[in-house]
Each structure stands twice: as structure tokens, then as C-alpha cells.
Image (cartoon, grey):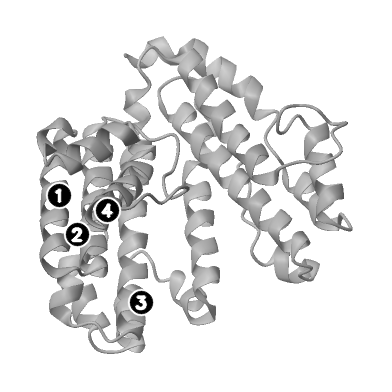
Amino acid sequence: MADKNYIYAVARIRAHELGLLSGAVLDQLLSAPDEETAVKLLQEKGWGTGDAGADTVNVDAMLTRETEKTWELIKELVDDESVFNVFLYEKDYHNLKAAIKETCTAGEHPGIYREGGTVDVQLMKDAIEAREFDRLPGHMAAVAKEATDTLLKTRDGQLCDVIVDKAALSAIYEASKQSGSELLALYGELTVATADIKIAVRGQKTGKTREFLSEALAPCESVSVDRLAEAASGSAEAIYAYLESTGYGEAVEELKLSPAAFERWCDNRMIRAIKPQLYQSFGIGPLAAYILARENEIKTVRIILSGKRNGFPDEFIRGRVREMYV
């Protein structure tokens, strides 16, 4: 679809942006004395089913419903929402791992699949069980076979995960670069680079070899897989020194604090990167930015509600709250 055909869609998105949570609303949620009060505040803003008078609320169902609303809107606005599939590949490959392990262990494990991917879960399970991998999308078929064969031969679940996780990052990267959208390309770059950094840090802490790290890391433009693997096979300080030479130097202090601090930094960097789309009047960018903004606020609400439920201090929760798009 040409950019000019997104003008009406962008106008609709502008109206919906007015309903996004602001920093002021997050402060209200943080100031709520308990989870129940925070949930009622969200209901008053239209979250969930819109029934603000309900006595009990299933928080997971409420947050799931918010994700559904986002995609329902996108489907209303564009003729072909497949251009946004790049945002759903993470779910697809999570489901692929689950289907492979469920098939190879010959058991049923309810609740292990995620809704909202681009590939029907039952189709995925049937294809793997019948070893008819060509029934899967082209970017998934080969890795499905490789991961299944590996798990059956080695019974090494971690190795299976590494194979599928790297393929997921590669699929996201390729789709984002081929989209023709500057914002989607940026999304793919940041997604893969920050995932590589997490893999490297985790690998260094658990003593993974350079060979293992080289196999696990997915190539991208802003991070050198070879240099990151070399650093991670050495020390945390070597990783920090390498990152200081890249565009991810700001992440070093967050990595030194905690994995949670780095996760927050990653999410905040993405939000800062997409904020210029607030001033674009046409193109796919504002729609993609809205999807990411919604994912970000839903994640943040989940963090706040979980913190309230578990009785964490407000300052502890505040330290994990993400920046908002608006």
C-alpha cells in the first residue's frame, strides 16, 4: 500500500493516541494503595471490557484484551496487516519451540502457547508431528526441521532453544529490512542488537564458549557478532569495553545495575526512537509506532499491577516503569 493511502489511517491513529497512558496517569497508578484501586482506574479509562462496575477483574484477561483491541484497530485501518507481522514473529517462534518440545515429549502441556501469532498453532503442531515442515512458512520450515531433529537426537532442550531463538531474530531482522519502512528497519535493528547483548551477558555469566556464543548470536549492522562473542567468552568488563565502542555505550551502566535495568533501557530506547512518528502525517510509521506504544504501556501496566499485588514499595516499582510514547 502506498504511503498516500495511509493518510486516513494515520488520522484515525492520532485520535486513538489521545487514549494512550501518559506519565501523569502512570503516577496515579503508582500512587494507588493497592492493585484493586489501580485496576479500577484503568477500567475508568476504558481498559478491559469497559465494565468499570465489575466486582472482580482477571488482570491477565484485561491486558490480553488490550492487545486484542490494538490489532482489531490495525485490521480496521489497513487492507493487509501482514506488513506488521514482524511484530508477531516472536510469538510464532515461541510457539514453534513449544510445539517441537510437546511433540518430542509426546504429551499435552496446556498454557504453553501464546495467542496472536501469524501461524495457527494447530497447523504448527500437526506439521511437526507429521514431519511435514514445508507446511510452515518459508522462513520457519528449515529451522523447524533442524530444531526437531536436534532435540530428538540430543534431547538437549537448550540447544533446541538456541536454534529457534536465533532463527526468530533472523526472521525479524530480514522482514524489517525488507519492509521498506525506516521505522520497521530500526525496530529490527534494535531488537536483534539488544537481544544479542542479552545473550552475550548471560553467556558470559554461565561460562559459554566462544563457539556457542557465535552460534547463538544473530548478525545485525550495529553489533559485531564476532567481537561480541569474543568479549563474552572473556569477561563482563570485555563486553562493557566493546559496547562502549558502539552505539550502545549508554547501556553499560544499566547492565552493571541489573538485567531488569537493562530491559528497561532497551524499552525506553525503542520508545525514544519512535517518538518522531508523532509528527508524521502519512506513511506506515505512525501505525507501527502506535503498536509499539501500546505494547510498551501494556507491559508497564503489568509491571505496576504485579508490583502492587506483591506489595513492593512504590519506588521499587517506579524504577521499572517504562517511558511513555505520549
Residue labelled with disc 1: 143
Q: Which mark is residue 163?
A: 2
Contact, mark 3 vs mark 1 (Cβ under 8 Å): no
Contact, mark 4 vs mark 3 (Cβ under 8 Å): no
Residue 326 visible in rendering: no
Residue at figure coordinates x 27%, y 52% from the top left: 169
Observer-side mark, 3 or 1, equals 1
Quick one: label 3, few (<14), some, or many (20+) residues within 10 Å?
many
Element under label 4?
A: loop
Element under label 1?
A: helix
Q: What's the residue type where badge 2 is placed?
A: Ile
Residue 299 falls left or right of residue 7: right
Residue labelled with disc 4: 106
Calculate the distance from the C-alpha at mark 4 to the C-alpha at mark 3.
34 Å
Residue 52 percent location from the top left of the image: 84, 31
Sequence-first disc among 1 and 4: 4
Calculate the distance from the C-alpha at mark 2 to the C-alpha at mark 1.
7 Å
Contact, mark 2 vs mark 1 (Cβ under 8 Å): yes
Element under label 2?
A: helix
Residue 174 falls left or right of residue 196: left
Q: What's the residue type where badge 1 is placed?
A: Val
Q: What's the residue type where badge 3 is placed?
A: Val
Residue at figure coordinates x 58%, y 27% from the top left: 69
Calculate the distance from the C-alpha at mark 2 to the C-alpha at mark 4.
21 Å
